[in-house]
Amino acid sequence: MTIHIGAKPGDIAETVLMPGDPYRAKWAAETFLEDATCINEVRGMLGFTGTWRGNRVTIHGSGMGMPSLSIYANELIRDYNAQTLIRIGSCGGMQRKVEVRDVILAMTASSLSTPSRGIFKELNFAPCADYGLLRAAADAAAAKGVATHVGGIYSSDVFYDERPDLNEQMTRHGILGVEMEAAELYNLAARHGRRALAVLTVSDHLLTGEALPSEDRERSFGDMVEIALEAAFA
Ligand code: HPA
């Protein structure tokens, strides 16, 4: 047990998928894993461990934003020995070529700041995905025929953004989408020598204002979970 995770030693698999929403962790575990059991519910942050095609997998919520993700990812890495951590979540599209329902594989994650800022001081560290996971996820997405984009994303500290000029610069520099967690996950994986990737579904669009209707969300999010699982065990 850690401060924020009630799981016993050994309850958590080496491969962990991390959606922001604890109820999405429950849905993904019930939909895609066999013999899924709940291994954490401290503060309502649900985690489940089961198997996928015979491989042990944990699906554990991260909460919203980098400080929350940082707590869970630190404990999963340092106390439970998680080796492969894949964020599965939603993002806002920032390019015309990126459409709602498309999948984004985050090669890099830019930010204004992350919880690791204090360590890096004046250094602008470039958080990036594990290349093996990234390549395997791109292959899995192509095999499924899912419209997929691979490139940089923006990990923001705010959902209710007061800096449209910053979004403009991100779009101008080819950033594909905005979410709120990946950069710190990549920082932690780099620090501890683990593999990380963010597989994101575009749920809304900053340029067009379009948003994924709730009835379409499950199908689109399902593709993302399968891509993450196939990449983890490729
Ligand atoms: N901003 C930040 N995070 C998000 C967004 C957004 O527009 N959409 C989904 N996650």
Image (tube, grey):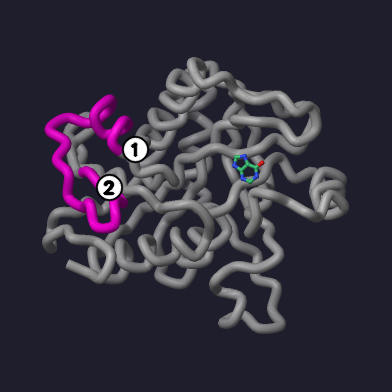
Quadrant of res 156: bottom right
| Residue located 75% across and 45% down the image | 175
Report the residue at 16% width, 58% height from top. 7
Q: How far from the left and from the top, in percent, is residue 224?
A: 46, 30
**Which picture quadrant has residue 202?**
top right
Give me the residue at 16% from left, 36% from top: 36
Q: How crowded is mark 1: few (under 14 residues within 10 Å), some or many (20 or more)?
A: some
Residue at 25% of width from left, 70% of height from top? Answer: 3
Does the rendering let one see residue 143? Answer: no
CB-based contact (under 8 Å), mark 1 and mark 2? yes
Vertical placement of 115 versus 57: above or below?
A: below
Identified by mark 1, the residue type is Tyr
Instruction: Give the amino acid at mark 2.
Output: Leu
User: Can you identify the residue that label 1 sits on?
Assistant: 23
Q: Please tell me whether residue 99 is drawn above or below residue 134 in the rendered image.
A: above
Please state the quadrant of the image where ligand 1 appears. Answer: top right
Does the rendering let one see residue 160?
A: yes
Q: Earlier in the sequence, mark 1 or mark 2?
A: 1
Drawn side of residue 32 relative to residue 211, left or right: left
Query: For mark 2, what is the residue?
Result: 46
